[in-house]
Amino acid sequence: MTTRVADGGFHRGLQTSTFLAVAVAFAAQGYGYAAIVSALPTFKERIGASETVLSGIMLAVGIAAAGGSVLADAIAVRLGSRWALTVGFLIQAAFLLVAINTTSLVVFTAAVTVFGVGLGCVDASANMAGALAEAASSRPVFGRLYAAYTMAAIIAALATAGVHTTDWSRTAPIALGAGFAVVAALLVLRYGDRHVAPRTVDGKPASEERLPWRGIWLVGGLVFSAFVVDSAVATWSTVYMQDGLHAKGSVAPLAYAAYLGIVLLGRLAADPMVRRWGRTTTGFVGVAIALVGCVVVTTLHTTVPAVIGFALAGTAAGLLVPVAFSWAGELLPDRGDEVIARVNLFNYGGALIGAVALGALAGNAATLGVGFALPALALIVALPLLRKHR
């Protein structure tokens, strides 16, 4: 079956099997990352790592992921995004299995760092494949793709929470994630878009066509802002709820759960909103609601408003991220893989700022609420960037 509409784009037609393969790739990425992050307490106990050491390991993963984005660029411009996705998933699968079968701090650190390379490679190439899918269908698809990512991440977190019988069973969801990665690689290799960026454009080498650096920085700024919020909430919301607001252990995780719920709803709504109101308006809605959420967390230091505030903050990742990568895919279609690989790097900058800088500025759990002024500032910066896309 081939779907096609006549409202712009490349009009190559999008096969349902190709779209589903890309959606599975997004889901496998979301599942694998959430599974390993959810199991960090188990790994911390098994390898005898302190909080400081574990933070250093995750920093190394983030830096390696940036390198993986560069690797995806190098592979995609020669062989296409489906091969970059395949390589990234196979790296992830292999080193996830190494990570769950070692008790050595050194081996674990090396394994998850190389996993980070695969993580970044898939992050970038999945967005490349998404851009190709959107161009082929001439309709917004990034919202649905990121919704698949979020749903799979929620399933992974629930799976990890549900297995506590033995040390090894607690890593079973990660082993499943490795298998999911292999399946995704095979599907992408079989059904993924075989498009490779042209070697020439208007009779000259495509590599000589100037990259749209202004657009890359503008779209990258939107990605950066969204991931400052995402990383800040993911890293610090539960800590703030439990240690800063003294919420019960059963209540503290509700803040992040509410956040993920709104992220998912936003991503499900993103494509219809873009079709009806356009990317700019959809992005403004996402930023404005998320900004209100961050202000609520910053100013109202009680449990219920905090949960509501964290939930509202989810519209940044829910609406702004799909919009940003959709824009990135159209900046220079003939070199779209290279453009998206560069835009994807802003993801990791935002993640590091949200996870590291917020904690450093706040100083302790009691003042973390005020620290959420930092992601609010990042969202304020995103507003003029959106206006430049009008």
Image (cartoon, rainbow, N blue to C red):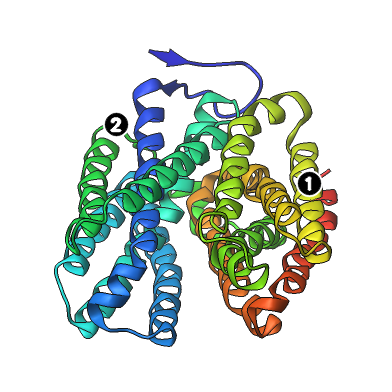
On the image, the x and y values in percent for residue 107 come to: 20, 80
Q: Name the residue nearer the viewer: 151 or 206.
A: 151
Q: Name the residue nearer the viewer: 234 or 162.
A: 162
Badge 1 crowding class, 10 Å Cα cut-off, few under 14, some 14 to 19, many 20 or more, is some
211 versus 47 height, above or below: above
Q: Name the residue nearer the viewer: 63 or 305.
A: 305
Q: Name the residue nearer the viewer: 305 or 84.
A: 305
334 versus 348 height, above or below: above
On the image, the x and y values in percent for residue 81 come to: 38, 47
Tell which circle, 2 or 1, labels the residue nearer the N-terminal end: 2
Please give the residue where the numbered disc 1 appears in the rendered image.
289
On the image, the x and y values in percent for residue 69 come to: 43, 63
Q: Residue at x 62, y 79 (%)?
A: 359
Asked if residue 345 lies left or right of residue 50, the reply is right
Asked if residue 287 lies left or right of residue 80, the reply is right
Determine the secondary structure under disc 1. Answer: helix
Placement of the C terminus among the 4 image quadrants? top right
Asked if residue 179 lies left or right of residue 330, the reply is left
Q: Residue at x 24, y 34 (%)?
A: 190
Q: Residue at x 42, y 51 (%)?
A: 125
Placement of the N terminus among the 4 image quadrants? top left
On the image, the x and y values in percent for residue 183 come to: 22, 41
Determine the secondary structure under disc 2. Answer: helix
Q: CA distance from mark 2 to mark 1?
A: 38 Å
Quadrant in which residue 218 is drawn? bottom right
* Disc on res. 191: 2
Residue located farthest toward the left when viewing the structure as drawn: 101
